[in-house]
Amino acid sequence: MIIFRMALRNVFRNRRRSLLTGLMMAGGFVLFSATLGISEGTYGSIIDMFTRSRTGHAQAHAAGYLERPSLYKAIKDLDRAGRVLDGLPEVEAWAPRVYAPSLAFAGSKTVGAQVMGIDPARERKAMRLEGQLAEGAFVPDRSSPGVVISARLASALALKTGDEFSLIGQGADGSIANDNFRVAGILSASGSAFEGPWCLMHIDKAREFLALGNRAHEIALVFTDYRKAREDAALAAAALADPALDVQPWQVTEKEFYQAMLLDKKGGDITNYVIMLIVAIGVLNTVLMSVLERTREYGVLKALGTRPASVFLLIMAEVFILTLVSCAAGALGALGLNHYLAAHGIPMPTPISYGGVRFTVMLSAVTAGTFTRPALTVLAAALAVGVFPALKAARITPVKALSSR
Amino acid sequence: MEKELVIEAKGVTKTYEEGEVKVHALHPVDLALRRGEFTAVAGPSGSGKTTLLNIISGLDKPTSGKIKLAGREMGAMTQAELSDFRRDHIGFIFQAYNLIPVLTVGENVEYVLLLRGTGAGERAARVNRILEEVGLGGKKNRFPSQLSGGQQQRVAIARAMVSSPDIILADEPTANLDSATGSALMDMMRELNEKRGMTFLFSTHDAMIMEKSKRLVTLKDGRVDSDSAADKAQRHD
C-alpha cells in the first residue's frame, strides 16, 4: 500500500514533467481514438454503401451455389425460409432473387446478359437499387415485360428507354427460354453495383421466363447492425435449420472486397502505431529521467531493506497511475471530439457516389472500441517502456546509488 | 560479564580496481563491537571509514576477510538475504539525511516497520514513542522539505531506531549540521544509547563526535591506527 502511496505522490512531485507526459499520452489517446472513430465511421459508410447496393449483409443460397452457381441449385421452399427470417428480430429486411445467364438481341446485335429477377417491393426495403437508375423507371411492382438494364448492356445493344429487345436462355425444365422485353430504365454507368451486362426484371417474370416455379437462387439479408453480420448470419442459418441452405455473411460472399478493406485498415493501424511509438518514447524519456534523478532515493530504499521487486513495482505503479490519469483525460477529450466528428464529420475533398449514395462527409463512429483500443494500447505501450527503467532502478547497487549526487 | 559481540570483522580488506590501477581502500582490518557500545571510527578523508561501514552493513562486499553481524556470517548471503538482514538488524543514519521526500515524517519512520511486517497498532505506537523521544512529536504529518536540517536528521535517527536494530550505523551524521545542532544530536543519541542500550557505530572526522564517543577507533590509510578500547585494555594489563 505504501508503495502505491509513494508512486502517487511521485507522479505529482515534478508536476510540470508529469503534466507534459500526461498531455502527450492524452493527446496520443485522442488522436488514436479520433483516427479509429473516423476509420470505423468511414469503413462503416463504405460497407453500408457496398452491401446495400446489391450484396446485402448476408446471403442465403442452396448449398454449393456460392462456389459454383447454377440455374438448378435453387432454394426450394422460399415461403418457409421467408417465414423463419420474418421471425428473427436481427433481420431488418430480406429479398429473394433469381439469376440466369442469357443472350440479349436487339436488331442485329447480340450480347451475353445476366438476368436478375427481383422483388421490387422487398428490394426497396433492403437495398438501394432504385437510386442507381440513370434514366427511366425502376422494375415495375408487378410482373411485366418492363426491365431495367445496366449501362453496359444498353451501350452494347444501343438501347434507350422504351426500346424493345429479346432474351434467349435455358429454362430450368430444359426448355428454351425466349421472350421480348421493354427497357423501363437504365442504370448509371458509374457508381453502380451493376457494371456488367445486367438485366433486372420482376422475380415473377424471371421465374416464368426461366420456368423456375416458386424457387429462388438467393436471399439477400439485411441485419439491424451490419457489424454483427457474421453472428447474425450464423443465427439465421441456425434458425433456418436446413442443411440444403448455406447462409454466409458479406465478408465471405464478397471476399475480395473484404480482404482489400482489411489491407487498407492495416495501413491506418500503422499510422496509429507510429503515434503510439512517439508517445512511448516520450514516456520512456520521462521515466528514465525520473529514475536517474532519484537514483540516490532508490539506494536508500534498498539500504533500508526494500526488495528489488518493490522498487520495480514502485516505478511501474508510477507509470500506471500517470497512464490511467492520462487515459481518463484522453477519453474525455476523445469523447467530445468523436461526438463532434460523428455529428459533423470531415468533408471529403472529392465526394464519392456509389450504389445510389453520395458520400460527401467522413463521419466518425463512436463505439466502445474507439475508447478501449487506445486505452489498452497507451497502457500497454507505457507499461512496456516502463519495464526498462524499472528494472534499472530495481538493480541499483545501494552503495553506488548512495554515493550519487 | 562481557556483553555479546554484535560485530566481528576479521582480516577485512577492500581493493577497488580502476582500470589497471588497484586502490587498496582497506588493508586487513579487525574490529569487534559489543552490544551497547557507542563507537566512532575516525580518520581523514580516504582513510577507509565509509568503506568499512559499507562492508559492515552489507552494502558492499569485502575483497577478503570475514564479517559477522549479530552472530551471522554476511559473506555467504545473497543480495536478497542481505536486504532482509539489513531490514531486520541494521539502522542507518546518513550524512545527507536521505529521507524519502514524498513520505511524511511519520511515514518515513514507519517505513522500516512496514518492511518488517509489524502490525498497524504496534507501528503507530512505536512511531509516536520514538518521535516523542527525538522531540518531533508534533511534526508527524510534515514532509521532510518542511523541516530544518537538524530536524531531518532527528527523523533519520528515529527511523534508524524505531525497529530496535542490533546496531545503528551512522556515516558522518553531523557533517551537514551546524556545530550546536550536531552536538545536541550527539547528546540525544548518547542518551538513547544509555537508555536503550542500543549499539552505535559512527564514521566521522568531527572532533566533537570523537569526544562524545565512548570508544574511538582511528583509521589511517586503510589500517586501524589506534583503538581506545585496546589502549584501555593495555593500560589495565
Image (spheres, rainbow, N blue to C red):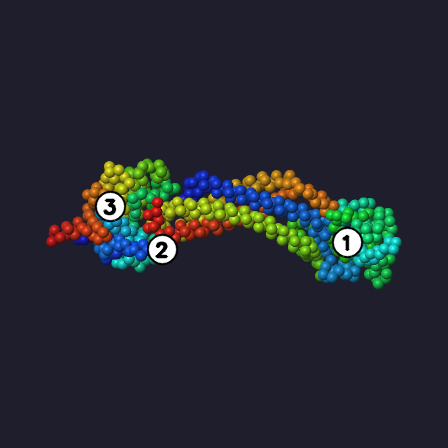
Mark toward the viewer: 1 or 2:
1
Q: What chain is tagged by disc 2?
A: B
Instruction: Evaluate if marks 2 and 3 touch, with contact meaning CB atoms under 8 Å apart.
Output: no
Question: Dot 1, how many residues are within 10 Å of its Cα: few (below 14), some (14-19), or many (20+)?
Answer: some
Residue at numbered disc 3: B204
Q: Position of residue B38 (x, y in %)?
A: 22, 47
Distance between mark 1 and mark 2 Cα atoms: 76 Å
Instruction: Evaluate if marks 3 and 1 touch, with contact meaning CB atoms under 8 Å apart.
Output: no
Going from the N terminus, do you reach mark 2 or mark 3 first? 2
Question: Dot 3, how many residues are within 10 Å of its Cα: few (below 14), some (14-19), or many (20+)?
Answer: many
**Residue furthest toward the bottom?**
A174
Q: Position of residue A94 (x, y in %)?
A: 74, 51
Q: What chain is tagged by disc 3?
A: B
- Check disc 1 and report its element: helix, strand or loop: loop
Q: Position of residue A258 (x, y in %)?
A: 66, 54
Relative side of A147 to B221, left or right: right
Residue beneath the point at 72% across and 52% down: A55
Distance between mark 2 and mark 3 Cα atoms: 29 Å
Q: Amino acid at mark 3?
A: Thr
Residue at numbered disc 2: B80
Residue at numbered disc 1: A196
Distance between mark 3 and mark 1 Cα atoms: 97 Å
Q: Position of residue A221 (x, y in %)?
A: 72, 52
